[in-house]
Amino acid sequence: MKKAAIIIAYWLAAIFLTATLLTSLNYDLGQAVLMSLSFLPAAMALSFFLPKAERTQNRRKRILDKICIILGVMLLTFLLIYIWQYIFIALIYQDKYSNWPIPAMLGNPVFVAAILAILAYGHYLLIKWLDNKYPTEQIITFTSDYKKVSLMKKDILFIESRDSEVLVYVRDGQTYRNKTSISQWENLLGTEYLRIHRSFLVSIQDAKLTSADLVCIGQQSIPVSRKYRDTVKSILQS
């Protein structure tokens, strides 16, 4: 609850600061607040998707993913600026500003990109700080041998895919069988876990890169495939 309140406070402050900046473009404060809202969806999308692009295995694909994300959020922002200017402000102010042109600065990609980058990066840093200060004890529940198993997420060391089943290796030495695919486990466990092979997903906190193609975790040595080698190196050696 405290984390959610801090995040909400951040975005409220972001709206106010952005609105203060936009008042220099001849908007009154109410109009500026409305226009500042047009930046929020894209800034949130940017802060959410860019870190995921960093984990893309292939460098070329990582660059292309970033370009697509940035172009996508820029187009979304310009669309929302247009909608806010000619629909919401016009409706609220009784059509007084329906023919008022969008200020030139809001059509400037550099200006718009700078605002988005500041908002998104601030949110990204805030989330990292909150995760360190208020770590969540997430419980993962799944079925193993027809029984329901609940584990603390931090106790899962790594996941191994073996044809039709997946093995869940736990900190206390136990292993659980499961039918959920490793890709689904990757989505479930999130950014604290790293795919190092088509068959292995490991806890970043516990994994140590011992060579270019080998990761040590617990008492196990796990191979790193060529496809994931660059990503594994950049994350585990950072």
Image (tube, helix red, strand yellow):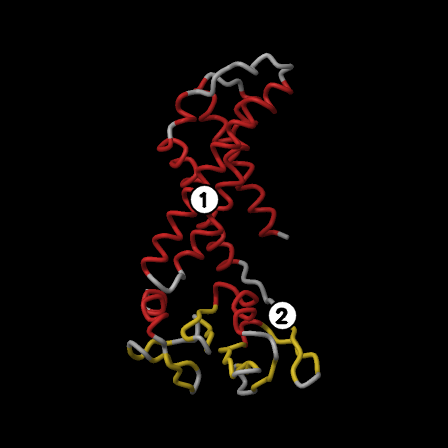
Query: Splitting the image into 4 quarters, where does residue 223 fall?
Result: bottom left
The disc label shown at residue 139, or none: 2
At a point 42% along the width and 35% down the height, the residue shown is: 115
Amino acid type for the residue under numbered disc 2: Ile
Q: Badge 2: how crowded within 10 Å, few (<14), some, or many (20+)?
A: few
Q: Badge 1: how crowded within 10 Å, few (<14), some, or many (20+)?
A: many
Judge whether 189 appears above or below 157 on screen: above
Q: Earlier in the sequence, mark 1 or mark 2?
A: 1
Residue 119 in the image, given as x and y percentages of width and height = 45, 40
Q: Secondary structure at mark 1?
A: helix
Query: Splitting the image into 4 quarters, where does residue 105 fall?
Result: top left
Residue 96 in the image, given as x and y percentages of width and height = 59, 12
Residue in front for this viewpoint, 169 or 160: 160
Q: Please identify the residue farthest to the left as the structure is shown.
A: 212
Judge whether 10 appears above or below 59 on screen: above
Q: Left or right: where does residue 60 sit relative to residue 4?
A: left
Residue in front for this viewpoint, 133 or 77: 77
Q: Left or right: where does residue 174 sit relative to residue 53?
A: right
| Quadrant (top left/top right/bottom left/bottom right) for the C terminus | bottom left
Residue in front for this viewpoint, 163 or 189: 163
Amino acid type for the residue under numbered disc 1: Ala
Do the residues bearing badges 1 and 2 touch, measured as CB atoms within 8 Å?
no
Residue 82 in the image, given as x and y percentages of width and height = 52, 27
At a point 29% along the width and 76% down the height, the residue shown is: 212
Judge whether 232 appears above or below 62 on screen: below
At a point 54% along the width and 67% down the height, the residue shown is: 189
Task: Calculate the distance from the C-alpha at mark 1 to the C-alpha at mark 2.
Answer: 29 Å
The disc label shown at residue 120, or none: 1
